[in-house]
Image: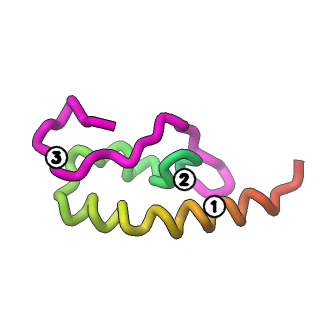
Amino acid sequence: MTNTLAPHLTIESPCVSKCGVSGMTNNCVGCGRTLKEIAGWSGYSDTERKDIMSALPARLEANKIKLAGRHP
């Protein structure tokens, strides 16, 4: 997804337009970021965004495991 609000960003947003923060994980179920990370994304340096991006695959996998164990 291209970020039109902050064209100076060299690292694009990980948003996949499946937004919703899980109360069980406190992360977006689509991209895995926290609300704080989502809100601050355009203000982060490339290094900060890169660090977050590198953590997302493991975070999303952990979220799947945690959510799979929930009871309806």
Residue 48 pos. (x, y %): 25, 63
Q: Is residue 40 magenta?
A: no
Q: Are marks 1 and 3 in contact (CB under 8 Å)?
A: no
Residue indicated by mark 3: 9
Which mark is first along the chain, 1 or 2? 2
Return the mark for residue 22.
none
Residue 45 appears in which quarter of the rendering? bottom left
Q: Position of residue 38 (x, y in %)?
A: 38, 46
Q: Nearer the viewer, residue 27 or 64?
A: 64
Residue appearing at x 37%, y 67% in the figure: 54
At label 1, counting other C-alpha atoms closer than 10 Å, the crowd grade (few under 14, some 14-19, many 20 or more) is: some
Instruction: Label the magenta part by its dominant secondary structure.
Output: loop
**Residue at x-position 45% and y-position 62%:** 56
> Pointer 2: what residue?
27
Q: Residue at x 21, y 31 (%)?
A: 5
**Foreground tag (2 vs 1):** 1
Q: Nearer the viewer, mark 2 or mark 3?
A: 3
Q: Which region shows up in magenta?
A: 1-27
* Residue at disc 3, secondary structure: loop
For the residues labelled 2 and 3, say whether their Cβ atoms are less than 8 Å apart. Answer: no
Residue at far right of view:
72
Relative height, residue 28 to residue 47 (above, below): above
Q: Which residue is mark 1?
A: 63
Q: Is residue 13 left or right of residue 61?
A: left
How many other residues sit within 10 Å of disc 2, few (<14), some (14-19) or many (≥20)?
many
Of the image marks 1 and 3, the number of the one nearer the N terminus: 3
Give the residue displayed 27% in from the left and 58% down from the top: 49
Mark 2 near mark 1, Cβ–Cβ under 8 Å? yes
C-alpha gap between disc 2 and disc 3 = 22 Å
Quadrant housing residue 26:
bottom right
The quadrant where residue 61 appears: bottom right
Q: Quick check: is 11 in the magenta stretch?
A: yes
